[in-house]
Image (spheres, helix red, strand yellow):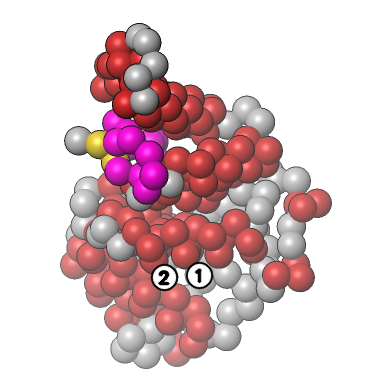
Amino acid sequence: MGITHAGHAATQAVSLQQHVDLSASIEHGLDLSSFDTSAGGVWLPIRPTPTPGNENLFDESSAKEGGWKGLAGLLEALTPNIDTSAPLTSSQITDRISAMLDHGQNHEALNIIERRQAQLNEQGSIGTDVQLLFLRGRALSALGRHNEAISTYLNMTTLYPELPEPWNNLASEYVKQGKLDMAVDALTMALKAAPNYATAQANLGEVQLMLAQRSFAEAARLGARNAAARASETSSVLKH
């Protein structure tokens, strides 16, 4: 099946590899010199998960239904193997949501994400939970809500341009819509943020092959010699 791009020949459809979390960037440490505070972003560093008993992120004594206890009930029902009797840290919550997405619990994960964001808003938290926003993009994409996923990733690239993963996943969304040139631009930005980002580099190669296949197919339509064979060869590479 090909992706039809307005004004161009059909292009072999290939899914790019999406990144599933921001752990690599966060654990490696980021160069925040390019962080755009003027765009309204607030950088919230993710701290290591504390040893149980040392610190609670939530105060159960003041929690209301719909707050921590309501969220904990949802998490317990969906992932019963982990004890939620004690408040979970921010990183533990996002890890749980990520695992839900990995297992295809996309509707449930988005529900948790929205409940968690409402909880943070109720607490008067300043800034954005970066991991939570990234997981929202993943959930929306998995549910086929690609325009909303694109909006989420675009928002992240504005607030946190130094993070390469949103650029990568934005490119994946563009490819699904046949917007190959925009995908190249997004992957170029990902590699500008992190030159050694292997996933983005591999994805850029895939998109360049798609562009080559599209060009050969168009050349064949116009009568160029051997272009059809080259289009077929490129398509074969993409299938593998």
Q: Amino acid at mark 1?
A: Asn
**Residue 82 in which image quadrant:** bottom left
Q: Which mark is residue 209?
A: none
Residue range corresponding to the magenta coloring: 4-18
Q: Which residue is mark 1?
A: 56
The crowd level at tag 2 (other Cα within 10 Å; few <14, some 14-19, many 20+) is: some
Residue occupying image coordinates x 21% and y 51%: 104
Between residue 77 and residue 54, name the one nearer to us. Answer: 77
Residue 114 lies within the magenta run: no
The stretch drawn in magenta includes residue 7 = yes
Three-letter amino acid code of the residue under disc 2: Pro
Query: Considering depth in this image, is 70 or 199 the residue closer to the camera?
Result: 199
Asked whether 184 or 73 is in front, the reply is 184
For this orientation, the residue located farthest to the front is: 223
Q: Residue at x 25, y 59 (%)?
A: 143
Measure the alpha-carbon separation of dots 1 and 2: 6 Å
Q: Are circles 1 and 2 on residues that touch, CB within 8 Å?
A: yes
**Residue drawn 53% across and 38% down?**
184
Which residue carries the number 2 mark?
A: 87
Residue 104's place in the image compared with 57, above or below, is above
- Is residue 218 shown above or below 106? above
- Expressed as whole percent of the image width and height from the top left, the position of residue 195 reads 66, 31
- Counting from the top left corner in percent of width and height, residue 162 is at 67, 49
- Is 112 left or right of 49, judged from the image as shown? left
Q: Secondary structure at mark 1?
A: loop
Mark 2 lies on a secondary structure that is loop
Q: Earlier in the sequence, mark 1 or mark 2?
A: 1
User: From the viewer's perspective, is residue 199 above or below residue 27?
Assistant: above
The N terminus lies in quadrant: top left
Q: Which residue is depicted at the point 75% across and 46% down?
A: 31
